[in-house]
Amino acid sequence: MSVCDAAFDQQDAEVVCRELDCGAPVQVLGAAAFDQGDTQMWTQEIQCRGDESQIYKCQISFKFTPKNCSYKNNVGLRCTEIINVRLVNGSSPCSGTVEVLHRGQWGKVCGDGWDLADAAVVCRELDCGEPVDALSDAQVGLGSGPIWMNNAMCTGSESTLKKCESVTWGFQGVCQSKSAGVMCSGVKLVGGSRCSGRLEICHNQTWMSVCDAAFDQQDAEVVCRELDCGAPVQVLGAAAFGKGDTQMWSQEIQCRGNESQIHLCPTSLPHIHNCSHDNDVRL
């Protein structure tokens, strides 16, 4: 049923936005702001206090007699559309354990059946580019709160995790794989702060150090952008943040400087340099 704008106020809007996990109401709109409906009209006045978790828990008035209520008076609502997915305990803003917001509380996603297609949707929703890895046993951390979601079965093309088919909310069963996690960004800085440290790149699910001879200012622009760390201040060689213990990246990175992620940059054939962990690039 459609709801008449005369039967709906700010307190009702608070509850609807909360129930839909859409933050706070920005504007209550009348006069069929989002086109006229073709359903029956709701004939009772909704009387929410504003703190209810769902609209059906609000009181209603049977004394309400709508005047001039037609499809031209359908109520519309605009909420703030808060972020419903986040990554925690990761090495960068685009990697970590997946948590979803459901009914005002953050919770985990069961890792059973979690795959790269599911990870791709999370990466897209968070504007983190392409997925590098889907972590089904939460190597990045266990997360917190209840398990809210199971059985996502995304195709990989959805814009948000909530649009994936067969999503089970409020999951109460046994989760064999702990929490789901993703790695969207295949780059991290270690040994320093979130925005400074020794550069490592993930390739084929293996973290590798980068030789300072294979890295320049344009490459640094992309790494800082990908990590949401602003502009590069200084590119450092000679193991400025300590020596790594990973494999060495064997190709020269050739970014133009305007790419959104390092994996979008061209690379050359393996280059020949005397590269060891003494030459790990720092940023």
Image (cartoon, helix red, strand yellow):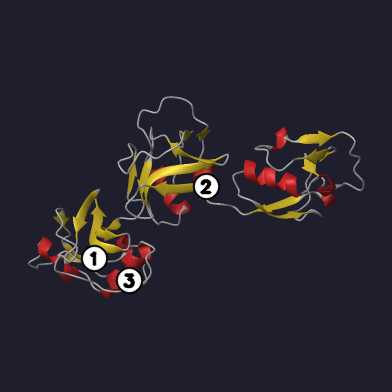
Label 1 vs label 3: CA separation?
Answer: 16 Å
Does dot 2 land on a helix, a strand or a loop?
loop
129 sits to left or right of 166: left
Which mark is on residue 84? 2
Q: Within 10 angstroms of label 1, few (less than 14), some, or many (20 or more) residues?
A: some
Q: Measured from the top left, where is residue 82 in percent x and y?
A: 56, 52
231 sits to left or right of 273: right
Q: Nearer the viewer, residue 134 or 58?
A: 58
At label 2, which amino acid type do we have?
A: Asn
68 sits to left or right of 141: right
Does dot 1 land on a helix, a strand or a loop?
strand
192 sits to left or right of 116: left
Circles 1 and 3: CB distance less than 8 Å?
no
Give the number of the mark in front: 2 or 1. Answer: 2
Q: Residue furthest top?
A: 173
Which residue is the site of mark 1? 267
Label 2 vs label 3: CA separation?
Answer: 29 Å
Q: Measured from the top left, where is residue 12 in percent x and y?
A: 74, 44
Tell me what residue is drawn at x 24 percent, y 73 percent. Answer: 216
Point out the image quarter for the C terminus. bottom left
At label 1, which amino acid type do we have?
A: Thr
Tell me what residue is drawn at x 51 percent, y 48 percent. Answer: 160
